[in-house]
Structure formats: C-alpha cells, structure tokens
Image (spheres, helix red, strand yellow):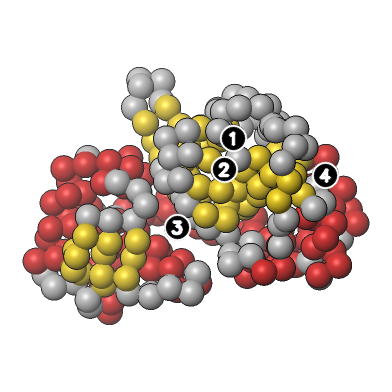
Amino acid sequence: MSRFDSGPADAPPAAATGCATLDCMHCSVRHLAVCSALSPDEGLALEAVTVSQQVAMGSTLARSGEPRQHVYTLTQGALRLVRTLSDGRRQINGFVLPGDYLGLSGSDHHRHDVEAIADSRVCRVSLPHMRELRQRFPHLERKLLQRACQELDTAQDAALALARLQPMEKVADFLLRLAEREARLGGEALRVMLPMGRGDIADHLGLTMETVSRTFTRLRQQGLIALPHLNVVEIVDEPGLRVLAEG
C-alpha cells in the first residue's frame, strides 16, 4: 500500500492519510518507465515508498532554484520544463510525457520550473529512497544510466535542430519525434496528440507563435499533414515529412 496525494502540486507533501493501492506492474506506461527494470518482487519495494500525486493543469510541480527533494515519473498528462531568461523571455527546454522520468540531474536544485500543461499525475519518490533502491537493485541503476544517455542524445539532436534547421524543418522534426513517442505508448503512430499549445511549441523551437501557426498551415497545404483538431495532427505523408525534417 502506498501513500496517495490528490492535493495540488504546490502544496507540501501530503501526510500518509487516505491511501490507494499502486499497481506498478500493471501501469499502462511501465514499459516506458525506469521501473520496468524491476521484477515484481522488487516493484513492491518501489510501491512502498511511492506517492501518487495529482498535478492540476496550470499548477507548478517544482520551481527553478528550489532544492531537489524528489524524483518523478509521469504516468498521465504532460509537463513542460521552463526557464526564464534574464530579459524575461521564456524558453521551454522540453516536454515531459507519460513514462518520462524527471530527476536525472547533477544539481542539488531544480534547473527549471516544472509546469503542468494538462491535468497530470506523477509517481513521486524521495531522493533518499531512490538512492537506496539504486543501491539495492543495480539493474535499476543501469536503467537510469541508459535513460541519461538517451536524454543526452535527445538534447544533442534538439540543439542541432535549433541551430541549423529552418522553421518548416523544425516543426517537421518535432512532429516526427512526437509520432515516435505516440507509437511507443501504443497509440497510432501517424496521429499525434498535442498537449501543448502553439505558443509552447514556439518557445521550445525558438520561433514565434505566428510562425508556428503559419508552418502548420503550409505543411497542411503541401499535403504532409492534416489538422482535424487544434490539438491533433495526422501525418499524411510520413516519408515526405521525414525528408523535410532532415533538412
């Protein structure tokens, strides 16, 4: 039985009142999460120190500069990692999607504001408990190292896209990365859900919101995508979109 916190993300950690059972082995995103490295028996040790925390849309899970006290795995919804520049501009360094692990950092403090862009839920584990689990289960440590390497590769690809690609190419690359993630979640690979708005996409890709909106329209006019809904993109011509994304 694990503690369950249904309060807002800005509130202090809830006391161990009001419990709900976590079934980590049957979690819908377990195959994407670092806890997939654990056996059923080991998963019980994780459940015993895990809090399931609701994060309402628009609330902040953690603020830049605050001491890091927990690590998180997103199980529902979507988060954004935001950094405010000295001139007041906002840079979105990335989006956290179901199955993602939030806590791979060498810093003792949060480096971003972590904000919910949809009603979300995270599994929260204190840093001391996670350190203990990593010592007890070396394969969990290896899984975290593998995830760190993947995040490094993703960051390098994103840096290249920001530095070299044109707006059409940036948006095409962004959509393809989301499509690949959708497929890993078990969804339709050519139907991309966008939990983030056009402004968030712009602040992530280093574009203006108007440029992002025009680019979506141009991609639709060229027959590469369809836009059945504001937050849904259907990839109509995946090879053509991939050629464009490669610049």
**Measured Cα–Cα span from mark 2 to mark 1:** 6 Å
- Mark in front: 4 vs 2: 2
- Residue 63, compared with residue 35, is above or below; it is above
Q: What residue type is labelled 3?
A: Asp
**Measured Cα–Cα span from mark 3 to mark 1:** 37 Å
Kindly identify the residue that appears in the image at 35 percent across and 20 percent down: 87
**Measured Cα–Cα span from mark 4 to mark 2:** 20 Å
Lower sequence index among marks 4 and 2: 2
Q: Name the residue under label 2.
A: 54
Tag shown at residue 129? 4
Q: What residue type is labelled 1?
A: Gly
- Mark in front: 3 vs 1: 1
Mark 2 touches mark 1? (CB < 8 Å): yes
Question: Callout 4: helix, strand or loop?
Answer: helix
Tag shown at residue 221? none
Q: Which picture quadrant has residue 166?
A: bottom left
Residue closest to the eye, 8 or 135: 8
Q: Name the residue under label 3.
A: 157
Do we see residue 184 in this rendering? yes
- Residue 94, compared with residue 180, is above or below; it is above
Q: Which picture quadrant has residue 11?
A: top right
Residue closest to the eye, 107 or 161: 107
Most extreme residue toward the left is: 221
Q: Mark 1 points at which residue?
A: 7
